Amino acid sequence: MIVECNDRLVRLFATLPGVDAVVGRSDPTPPHDAHAALLSLPHRLGTTLATVPAEVPYLRAEPERIEFWRRRLGPKAEARLRVGLVWAGNPGFKADHIRSPRLKAFLPLLDVPGVTVFGLQKGAGRQDLETCGPLPSSFTDLGAEISDFADTAAIMENLDLVISSCTAPAHLAGALGRPVWTVLPFAPDWRWLDQGMCTPWYPTMRLFRQDRRGDWAPVVGRVRAALQALARSRP
């Protein structure tokens, strides 16, 4: 089986089991007998909610990158949680303004006692760093150092938790089998269903749903309370 994907995903997707080759969209397509769009496979395979394949991890970070980022993050204080944060998606997505809380909404998470936060944000959302400062010393921005999703995956393997808006890194954390909390808008994408704290796609993911359209404060408040409880539970 050959997988064609975004160029930035080639290194990461090369870790998929059962894949013979991975090619970027900018590369020539190798000879093949049939083509199926990835999101058509659940239909083709007759997948239902009861049969969603959710054995994780099915993606893995490269060991040498895990070690690189372990050194970059520095010695881990056992009493402190390491949390990765993503606050915005691709603005090219037509409903991004609905799904992306932005950094300002997430500011209450940056000063939770016993928590160190690492910014994993890439793309246009990084502009928030220029308008939301000064940020507390418990926050470290890593986004400028991340080259692709293989780096993001390796960082996640060094974290205790990922908190993300409804965007690619949330799916990456779920595919890696990492603990991940995903905040969702009032009317989320179809894959999240319309209720519940869990998702059949990712058994290590917890969902935090918006109660009212456009109002992120109550959602972030619940995330903060859960984060405080998790931090207090550390030895």
Image (cartoon, grey):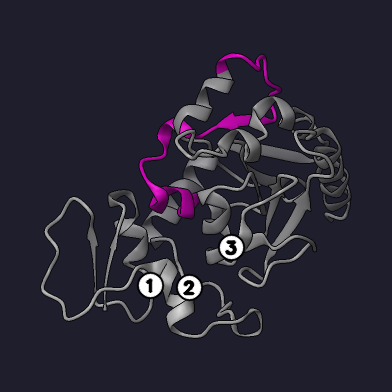
x and y, in percent, of residue 120 in the image: 54, 39
Q: Residue at x 66, y 72 (%)?
A: 200
Q: Magenta residues, as a range?
A: 130-155
Along the line of sight, the residue nearer the viewer: 145 or 125: 125
Q: Is residue 66 above or below residue 140?
A: below
Identify the disc placed on residue 58: 2
x and y, in percent, of residue 63 in the image: 40, 62
Kindly indicate the quadrant of the structure image that contains residue 139.
top right
Q: Residues within 10 Å of mark 1 (few under 14, many from 20)?
A: some
Along the line of sight, the residue nearer the viewer: 7 or 150: 7
Q: Are marks 2 and 1 in contact (CB under 8 Å)?
A: yes
Quarter of the rendering occupied by the N terminus: bottom left
Left of 10 or right of it: where is 43? right
x and y, in percent, of residue 52 in the image: 58, 79
> Residue flagged by tag 3: what amino acid is it?
Gly
> Residue flagged by tag 2: what amino acid is it?
Tyr
SS of the residue under disc 3: helix
CA gap, disc 1 to disc 3?
14 Å
Q: Is residue 194 above or below residue 20?
A: above
Q: Is residue 80 above or below residue 58?
A: above
Q: Is residue 131 magenta?
A: yes
Q: Residue at x 43, y 30 (%)?
A: 144
Q: Is residue 136 magenta?
A: yes
> Residue flagged by tag 1: what amino acid is it?
Leu
Q: Residue at x 60, y 38 (%)?
A: 118
Among numbered discs 3 and 2, the one appearing first in the sequence: 2
Q: Which residue is mark 1?
A: 16
Left of 43 or right of it: where is 199? right
Q: Are marks 1 and 3 in contact (CB under 8 Å)?
A: no
Q: Which residue is mark 3?
A: 174
Q: Is residue 93 above or below residue 48?
A: above
Kindly indicate the quadrant of the structure image that contains residue 30.
bottom left
